[in-house]
Amino acid sequence: MTTNLANIVAAKWFNHGIVAVIVLAGVVAGLETSPAIMAQHGTTLLALDKLILGIFIVEALLKMAAHGRQPWRYFADGWNVFDFLIIVLCVLPVTGPFAAVLRLARALRLLRLVSTLPKLQLLVGALLKSLSAMGYVSLLLALLFYIYAVAGIHLFGKSDPANFGSLPAALLTLFRIVTLDNWGDIYFAQTAHVPALKVIIYFVTFIVFGTMIILNLFIGIIMNSMSEMHAEIAERDRAEHERKTGSATLGDELRLLEQDMEEMQTRLAGLRRRWGEGSSKLTRDRNAEEAGS
């Protein structure tokens, strides 16, 4: 019985059906924002809400039952915990202090696509994995903003108090510049009162550092995290396959064989280099002996 439930939960048709229900939940949540549609089809939409919630509850119960006598293993997966929390929010009372939470939960049901689609899980996992490294890049960006804000106040504070009159105003202006949103207006406003060379150096260096270099650092961190997530998912799938079948997949065996061949090639290159060095030394010794005789 447990094996049959596990096969059902892991089946593609089951997963595709849940994706369709999640998309339907998002469409219903969007339609409920229209007073005209609610006045005309409110009863039908509320019935669909209850049906969708019932499907989510049945899905969670099936996944728990698939673990047999250890249903708590359902909560070992963080994505299952996320899905369960959304279901809990959706079953809160419709009226009273939880009404706003319920309306928000209906919109949050669309986030279940992240837990259902593996590619979205990869992206979210990479973002979460890169948060620690992003903290240092964010600190570097904050230092850059602070230094340029102080410099901007000294350079342009008197001539343009609206943009550089205070530290908060300068920081907001720099944020606008770093997004490249009509930054030319701010630039030309400064050239009318400050030497053009100072303005050019200030704006060009800030845009280069703030937009190009820092942005590329963020992208590099995310790409590195995605590579690590790919490796972790591949290792998890391999371990799961070995646990179920007791053997590695053909792809895993090929990768291990390729690694062994690379190691053998490296050792062979080292032996050839040592043999070449030994032959050269032997030839030099022989030439020296012949020259001495």
Image (spheres, rainbow, N blue to C red):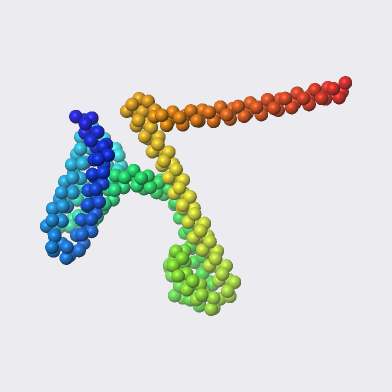
Which residue corresponds to the image point at 39% horizontal and 28% vertical from the top-left?
Answer: 248
* Residue 226 percent coordinates (x, y): 43, 45
Q: Which residue is drawn at 58% across and 71% down?
A: 198
Residue 123 drawn above or below residue 104: above
In percent of the image, x 36 and y 45: which residue is there?
Answer: 119
Describe residue 225's horizontal placement relative to residue 67 as left or right. Answer: right
Name the one closer to the observer, 248 or 217: 248
Quadrant housing the C terminus: top right
Query: What number of labels is visible?
Result: 0
Q: In this view, does 47 lie above or below 168?
A: above
| Residue at the left extreme of this rendering | 43
Q: In this view, does 283 lie to the left or right of 133?
A: right
Of all residues, the one furthest to the top in this rendering is: 293
Residue 285: image x %, image y %?
79, 24
Q: Which of 96 and 265 is in front in this view?
A: 265
Which residue is at a point 52% across and 60% down the rendered structure image? 209
Residue lying farthest to the right in this orientation: 293
Q: Which of 180 and 89 is in front in this view?
A: 180
Residue 103 image offset from top left, x and y in percent: 21, 57
Residue 118 seen from this side:
yes
The vertical placement of 51 against 182, above or below, is above
Task: Name the quadrant of the N terminus.
Answer: top left
Q: Does 268 sit above or below residue 218? A: above
Answer with left or right where residue 264 lies relative to residue 121: right
Q: Would residue 66 be visible to someone looking at this image?
A: no
Rendered location of residue 136, percent (x, y) = 47, 52
